[in-house]
Image: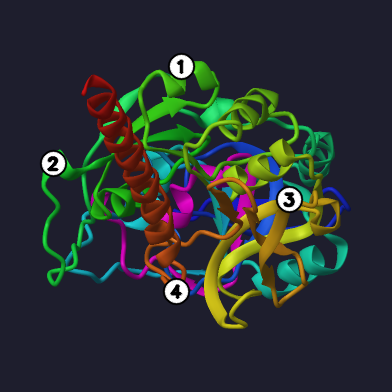
């Protein structure tokens, strides 16, 4: 039996459709994602916490879902909005349909509405608070009131909400490893302390592919605790919400920047790096969510196609003198990358590890590895020089 559902926006707009997920009501910030594939990865990306995701691709669910494609252990968006649901999933990898996946994840979702009209509203008016309400007796006015009560993501610290509650180790590589690359022996691995602000598994897999072993720590871990683990590098992950309230992460990052330990930030981690440097962040009109966003490398002039998922951005005009812009969006000119002139620290706004893609900026992980190896080589040279001095003094 088809269960009626509505999506109500805070401006009073009503969309009618049918429920395809869990029963009940949900509120959140309505955003649209322009990716053609990867709906399961989108649904399990913690960066979408407290957001209702609208997929602009009209036909969703045709490949079902599989445990291998999870980016985290649960479904994080507050809700899902699609145009047409596939009647039957068709993939040899599928073990569950999308509605089954949504119901098990307790996610309220709606199908059968005009997602093009909804996308135009969000694009023109900005990200909207919304409410999805399901049931045979849906109260549309109550749904609008619920949408208007949603406070918005500005000022909302969600990193500590979605973060792991305990430290854990990660050594697992890619599900589909590169057969042309020889495996790296365990005793050669670099040690990375990865801050979980909403980290995705594919980030950890790509770091493991590059020869790293990860200690994943909660978002509120102090810098002293992280440095006591003896890391070769610090990774600041993606995550949801406003970066400005994450004072614990900004404070820890400032302390990391006073050391010689390389720091790499992605998405929220990139924004926290900017804030730690003294820059400002701003709430974007409707953010960047999709897998077809052109980004230019300002040094080489090359253009890369990237995956994006963020509603806040670092204000390039507020960057201090010792921090330079490295990448810029060709959609709206917003800052996409930054690097420190006198520190081994850099960040990127998009998701260079994106699964299923694009993968144009995966070399950023190689750059992080290079910085960690260069630090180890410097330490080795200094140790050899000290040894020579001691031997010379002994004579």
Labels 4, 1: front one: 1
Foreground residue, 104 or 356?
356
Q: Kindly identify the residue that appears in the image at 17 percent across and 44 percent down.
A: 188
Which residue is at the front of the view, 97 or 235?
A: 235
Q: Nearer the viewer, mark 4 or mark 2?
A: 2
Q: Which residue is mark 4?
A: 360
The residue where tag 1 is placed is 225
Q: Earlier in the sequence, mark 3 or mark 4?
A: 3
Neighbours of disc 4 within 10 Å: few (<14), some (14-19), many (20+)? some
Foreground: disc 1 or disc 3: 3
Image coordinates for residue 225, horizontal then vertical, percent: 46, 16
Which sits earlier in the primary sequence, circle 4 or circle 2?
2
**Horizontal side of residue 116 vs 386, given as left or right:** right
Helix or strand or loop: what does disc 2 sit on?
A: helix
Quarter of the image with the C terminus in it: top left
Q: Around disc 3, counting alpha carbons within 10 Å, would you say few (fewer than 14), some (14 to 19), or many (20 or more)?
A: few
Q: Is residue 6 above or below residue 390?
A: below
Task: Specify the segment rendered in magenta.
Answer: 41-68
Residue at the image position 35 percent from the left and 70 percent from the top = 62
Q: Earlier in the sequence, mark 1 or mark 3?
A: 1
Circle 2 packing at 10 Å, graded few (<14), some (14-19), many (20+), is few
Q: Check disc 2 and report the residue beneath it.
A: 186
Quote the CA–CA distance across marks 2 and 1.
24 Å
- Residue annotated with mark 3: 322
Q: Residues within 10 Å of mark 1 (few under 14, many from 20)?
A: few
* Residue 161 among those drawn in magenta: no
Q: Name the residue: 53% across, 35% down.
A: 197
Residue found at x 30% / y 33%: 383
Is label 1 in a helix, a strand or a loop? Answer: helix
Check disc 3 and report its element: helix, strand or loop: loop
Residue lying farthest to the bottom in this orientation:
302
Give the vertical position of 57 relative to 177 (above or below): below
């Amino acid at each position: 039996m088809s269960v009626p559902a509505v999506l109500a926006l805070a401006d009073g707009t009503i969309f009618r459709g049918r429920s395809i997920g869990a029963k009940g009501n949900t509120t959140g910030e309505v955003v649209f994602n322009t990716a053609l594939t990867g709906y399961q990865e989108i649904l399990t990306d913690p960066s979408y916490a407290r957001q209702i995701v609208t997929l602009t691709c009209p036909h969703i669910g045709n490949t079902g879902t599989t445990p291998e494609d999870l980016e985290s252990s649960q479904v994080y968006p507050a809700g899902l909005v699609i145009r047409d649901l596939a009647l039957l999933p068709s993939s040899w990898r599928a073990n569950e349909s999308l509605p089954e996946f949504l119901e098990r994840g307790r996610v309220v979702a709606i199908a059968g509405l005009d997602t093009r009209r909804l996308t135009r509203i969000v694009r023109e008016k900005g990200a909207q608070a919304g409410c999805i309400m399901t049931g045979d007796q849906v109260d549309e006015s109550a749904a609008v009131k619920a949408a208007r009560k949603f406070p918005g993501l500005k000022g909302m610290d969600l990193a500590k909400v979605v973060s792991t509650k305990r430290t854990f180790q990660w050594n697992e590589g890619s599900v589909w490893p590169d057969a042309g690359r020889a495996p790296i022996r365990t005793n050669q691995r670099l040690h990375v302390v990865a801050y979980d602000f909403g980290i995705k598994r594919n980030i950890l897999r790509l770091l493991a592919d590059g020869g790293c072993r990860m200690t994943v720590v909660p978002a509120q871990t102090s810098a002293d605790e992280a440095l006591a683990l003896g890391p070769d590098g610090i990774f600041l992950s993606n995550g949801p919400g406003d970066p400005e309230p994450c004072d614990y992460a900004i404070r820890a990052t400032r302390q990391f920047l006073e050391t010689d330990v390389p720091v790499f930030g992605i998405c929220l981690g990139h924004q926290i790096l900017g804030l730690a440097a003294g820059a400002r962040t701003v709430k974007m009109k409707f953010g960047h969510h999709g897998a077809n966003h052109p980004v230019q490398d300002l040094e080489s002039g090359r253009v890369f196609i990237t995956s994006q998922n963020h509603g806040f951005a670092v204000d390039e005009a507020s960057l201090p003198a010792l921090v330079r812009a490295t990448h810029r969006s060709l959609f709206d000119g917003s800052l996409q990358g930054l690097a420190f002139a006198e520190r081994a620290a850099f960040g990127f706004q998009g998701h260079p590890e994106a699964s299923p893609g694009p993968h144009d900026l995966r070399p950023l992980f190689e750059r992080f590895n290079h910085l960690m190896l260069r630090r180890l080589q410097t330490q080795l040279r200094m140790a050899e020089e000290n040894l020579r001095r001691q031997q010379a003094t002994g004579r």
